[in-house]
Image: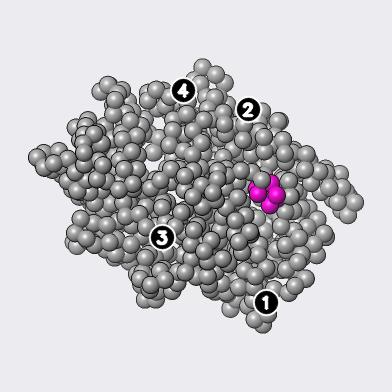
Amino acid sequence: MHNPLLTSFILPPFSKIQFEQIIPAIIEILKDCELTVEKVLSQKNSCEWNNIIQPINESQDLLNRVFSIISHLNSVINTPELRKIYKEACLLITQYNTCLGQNKKLYQLYVSLRKTNNYMLLNNAQKKYLQNILLNFKLSGIKLKQNKQERYLLIVNRLSELEIIFSNNLLDASMGWKKLITNKKELSGVPENILVSVNNTSENEAKEHWTLTLDFPIYSSIITYCNNDLLRKDMYLAYSTRASDKGPVPYKWDNTNIINEQLSLRFELANLLGFKSFANKSLINRMVRNPLKIIYFLEDLLKKVKNTASEELSQLKLFSKKHYNINVLNPWDFAYYSQKQKEHIYTFNDEQLRSYFPKQRVLSGLFKLINIIYGVHILERKNVNLYHPDVNLFDVFNEKGHMVGSFYTDLYARKNKRSGAWMDSCINKMLKKDGNLQNPVAYIVCNFNSPKQNKPALFTHNEVIILFHEFGHCLHHILTSIEIPEISGINGVPLDSIEFPSQFMENWCWEPDVLLLISEHYKTGEQLPNNILKSMLDAKNYQISLFILRQIEFSLFDLNIHYKFHPEKNNNVLEILKSIRSNVSIFPYLDDDRFPHSFNHIFGGCYASGYYSYLWAGVMAADAYARFKEDGIFNKDTGQSFLKNILMLGGSEDFINMFKKFRGREPNTDAFLKQYGI
């Protein structure tokens, strides 16, 4: 049977892919990769880029193109069959990459290129790539003895498997909880669009019923708007104990042992490579390379926000007591009474805004903004091969009308789709040896409410911010000028810088002129009324210190368990979290709270020892946006400077130097603190 994954596709041939074709394709591509390495090592040509790096990069790129499809589908249409295939593919690729990273002959060839006169003929991007790859060899155990290399391989294989198990447990635990409601009064206060989405009553049923799940749009709406405190409590307990030994389904998808094994193996891996801790190993290729510097940054920020956060919480308690006679705020009460207080102060709620942010208006306004700032055009492509009816494809064109890349949007929540929002690479930009240029392609994935009952998809302002955030990542990938895939777009960018372009993009969501571009009532076409606009802007920093405090808590927890872990110490993550919360948090928590068991960023993703990146990148984003505020938010020259010095360069230079080119200096926290009124 013809295998579409082995063709030179420009875009993924989604509808043509049969699951049984995936592993054979991976095996075939891996054989080709191994043959390419053998050919490179056996050749007698001079030590040059085109003879060594280019052929390996091209074979590796085909592997990445195919695996990105599998990884994406596993996240958005997760099935037991695909899970099994994905796990097997991860194991095969991890083994290959580790063996490649421990190939001493190949390493010596790269070292030889670095030492020859041909190195001086390389451009800056090629030199940066070579610098990165030599570091990656060291981090893959190239200098370890054979027995330790074998142990290294076992560890990385197991860690890859554990991350998959953690994510699957979390997804299963989230999908495994349901609550049937037969009395609509129990759902008092819940927005109508959510009631419609959870109404499972068929036409021939006389009595209505509603099925609640832990999908985030549903959970968030219940915990924020539902007047039924017992229902809020039920959902909170189910959500905060997912994949753990507690809650309504204890132990079934428990991540406790998964977390413990991950921490132990990460520590052992770091020690094998000569690092004191996994945090020290992880930071070796970051913008900030010293764990103590990060801890100082977080603790300094903590000093600046904790008093304000305490005042915010005190005001909420006073409000709840005065208006609702609530003496004690339970964890499931916080979002609910915060929303009540916000409505009381600013005379609007987030759900009211939905009618003014229909999907098409938001996207068209976003695309117009990008055209103004960066001079690029975005057009939807119809009649294209997709994996789900909710998905759309858009092409991106530069000022000269040349297509520079494409991106998919998959914006709605559905069954068997991972929760949250993210952007991921589908295809990387690459100039091939034959002279053909491969354009980059990206995925933007969210979990918003889908169109219901003749209504278009309607977003809250917070969802608009999420969309802008992920689109910032997308632009970083698509608008790159770097033609080496490992450092083009989002690739090769330090983890603590990767969130900079995305958080930077969020700023435009608060500009009145931009809000006019992206808003109109879905029925009347009326733009956002001035009184609502003013209230929304006034509410921008509502409980912002409490939000930052939570981010500091998560960041310190992540850093502590990876920096201070030692097998002979007490490594109970719940006790560590409790200790951090005693110094940082002012929130009420239950003893049964199992936040670590659903902390997918660090146990199921790539943010281990890196969650601080959101705050660190937030500082850079605020500082960079301050230049736009100085020059004008639609200033094309400033836009071109950001495009050329940040977005286009990918991971081809040290990020601090790229920032200094745009800002004229290193970043500081002044704009960040000013932006949030701290």
Few, some or many residues within 10 Å of mark 2 (<14, 14–19, 20+): few
The tag on residue 276 is 4
* Label 3 element class: helix
Q: Nearer the viewer, mark 3 or mark 2?
A: 3
Residue 678 or 591: which is nearer the viewer? Answer: 678
Quarter of the image containing the N terminus?
bottom left
Q: Which residue is mark 1?
A: 527
The answer to the question of whether label 4 and label 1 lie on touching residues, with beta carbons closer than 8 A, is no
Q: Amino acid at mark 2?
A: Glu
Against 261, residue 252 (above or below) is: below
In the figure, is residue 83 to the left or right of 570? left
Q: Amino acid at mark 4?
A: Lys
What is the CA distance from the residue labelled 3 to the residue labelled 2? 43 Å
Q: Amino acid at mark 3?
A: Ile
Q: Nearer the viewer, mark 3 or mark 4?
A: 3
What is the CA distance from the residue labelled 3 to the residue labelled 4? 37 Å
Q: Residue at x 22, y 49 (%)?
A: 54
Q: Earlier in the sequence, mark 4 or mark 1?
A: 4
The region drawn magenta spans 671-676
What is the CA distance from the residue labelled 2 to the residue labelled 4? 22 Å
Q: Residue at x 53, y 27 (%)?
A: 563
